[in-house]
Image (spheres, rainbow, N blue to C red):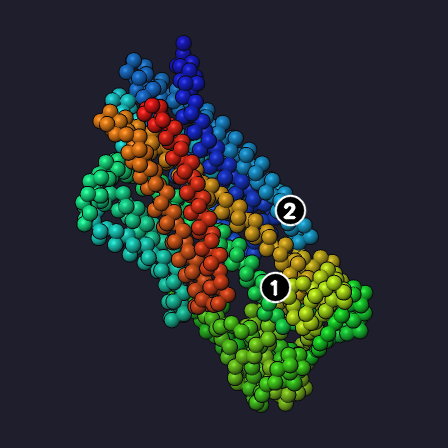
Amino acid sequence: MTLNDLWSKLRKHNKGQYRQFRFCVGFAVMLITSYLMMLQSPLIQNTLPDGGDSRKQVYMIFVLAAVGCLIFIAYAAGLFLRYKSREIGVFLALGTEKRKVRKGLRSEIMTHMAAASAAGFAGGCLLAWCIGQLFELLVRGISEYHFGFTLMGLGTSLIYAVAVFVLVIGLTARFMKRSNIMDILNEQRKQEPLKKMVTSKYLLSGVFLLAAGILLGFLMPTVVTKMTNHYLGSWTNCFYLAALLGLYQILVWSISCHRRGRNPQKYYNDLISYGMLKFQGRSIVRNMLVITLLLAGGLFAVFYVPQNTMTMEQGFEKCEAMYSMFYAKGAGVPDREEIYGLARQYGVKLRDYREADFVQAVGSGVNRDDVDENNDLLNIYEEKHAVYEFLSVSGFERLTGQRVQVEKGTYFQIQEDDAQESLFFRFDDMDQVYLDKKDAFLKLRYKGNLVYHSLVQGHGFDAESRYVISDEDYEKLKAGTSQFPQETQVLFDSVSSDPGSNQESGAFNGDAGGNAEAFSAALYKKFGERMSEDMKVCGAYDAYQRSLAGSEYGYEGRVRYDPGNSAKEADWQYEPHFLPLQKANGLKSYAVYMLLFLYVAVICLAAAGIISFARSQSVGLSSQQVFSDLEKLGADREYLKKLLAKQVRKVYVLPTMIGTVGIFAFEALLLQGNDGRLTSDELRLFPIMVLVLLAAAAYQYGVYRFSMKKVEKLLRFDQCFK
């Protein structure tokens, strides 16, 4: 009988150990493979905006999941090798050459690793394909891209599988380097105690490092840049390592620091539990750290869903007009009569149709796009900075119904109600307008903002700025410039003619009915098909910068729109905004982001649950001899079950508390850091976030209950006390 035959017989005898090892490896590879396949597919790559926060969050959470799965696999491999240690020690004790045992073990590990990795890779591809098909159903009519397997996705997935393979083989080689047979025989009984004695100062320093690392890494770069106009660079991310160290110290303290305090009897009652925890302290702390990070990453992904859904809804609610479009003079877009005729075809009654003309002219501004050799932000004043749009005060009153007093030589900027200045943009950056016919400048002074969301273009700053000036200055500007065409802004509302519709006139409540949506789609199509060539420009296009840069202009020819399919993401400066249509399309578009981030959350939370469960089983097995000895000393079943529960709860309670409360605080900090305040709309997110945290805690509690039942069965508590 060969050594391989003996391995085979032992494998049949210890099926549970092999099954757990293969499952852990296969599960981890499947999660990461499916994630990478989805992330690198054309569908997702073209859905996530380049350089946007969504893409950054997805990659950040992926790093957490990938590192967590690597640690998870390393733990599973170590656990499996501990199971194998007794068998290997027996072979060595019987005289088998260590070289042959090493070769046999390596072959055994490689065989099961290859099988588990291949199964995980195949399962990941299948899972990604299934999720991809679901994505395609959601984006049908929104994106022309489809889910597909890419070389990048396949390559990175294989690289991760190889990294896992190398990691486990390396752990196996290190395990077999032991020369003492007794060390190998006793590996299964070996504990990983925390040898250091820590005090409350150790805990305080951990809390300080955790808080300081997050605050310095997140807030300090923004604060310093705002105060000094100096960029600190990406090195500030190193502060997050201090936060990780602080978290580790907190977890170490929770395991190793137990003192009598004011209730010595409680300390003595739990003395055995404290000792058992310290004997396995290092491995428990490692697992608690990974579980905390995975929970935080998963919940961070979940928070994206209500946050962006609420942002979309708030954007619709703030718009004063249901329909808004603007176009350059001379374009053949539908006029008032054609729009009314189209509305009658779809049973939609229009109301409050109003329009006014904008004059386009080059104005001054401040260029803050570059930094100097010291990484300080440059503020370069330019007499001719960008093309702005100017509206007379009478035109503004006609469009909005607001009565405004605008003095000669002054201007108001049209903005949203919560608009704020930033490091790159100021309300008063413009102070003169160029009159190209006279080669002169019209001096203007900033007086404040006027709020009307339906007139704001983009973010409302720089080349997307719109200003209201006096009628006299408007006439001067209109007569003094002709370099760029005038524009017409149109606003109107609708009421469905359907007798069953209960829509209130003058307010968009999202219930305009299918008629309004169909009318909006038809008008969108006509507008897009008949616009002039000058209007076929992307959102970041600036006509003045184009005239300076010529053919080298970076935003030339980057228009993306489909007149027949308004649901597709459009990078189009003249895109009309029809709220009934935008709401219907917005729900579909955000469904893509929701599903992607929920998918990420499921991966992280599933990995956290599996690791928690595996650690629970390890706690029970490592303490099996202790429980047996306590039983012989007279401990009853209830005492042993309470003792076991205290051991297992340690894996769940503190990581869940830190992961949930910590990510809640970080999300609040993130919302605060976006614009320096917490708005009432953002505060409405907090109850939803609390419900998500409670659901995560309930999930962890369910895994804990399941783990307890399995460990009790594994330790045969019911049989021992019959």
Q: Which x, y percent locates residue 589?
A: 62, 55
- Residue at screen point 45% across, 44% down: 699
Q: In which quarter of the image is residue 539?
A: bottom right
Q: Distance between the residues labelled 2 and 1?
A: 30 Å
**603 vs 470, nearest the viewer:** 603
Tell me where residue 712 sits by quadrant: top left
Amino acid type of disc 2?
Answer: Glu
Q: Nearer the viewer, residue 383 or 155?
A: 155
Identify the mark nearer the N-term, 2 or 1: 2
- Report the residue at 54% width, 58% height from top: 308
Which residue sits at x=64%, y=88%? Answer: 471
Please give the residue where the numbered disc 2 appears in the rendered image.
Answer: 136
* x, y percent for residue 557: 66, 62
Which marked residue is nearer to the observer: mark 2 or mark 1? 2
Q: Is residue 478 left or right of residue 619?
A: right
Few, some or many residues within 10 Å of mark 1 (<14, 14–19, 20+): some
Rendering coords of residue 666 (x, y %): 41, 57
Which kind of residue does numbered mark 1 sit on?
A: Tyr
Name the one closer to the observer, 643 or 456.
643
Q: Determine which residue is flagged by label 1.
A: 555
**What element does badge 2 sit on?**
helix
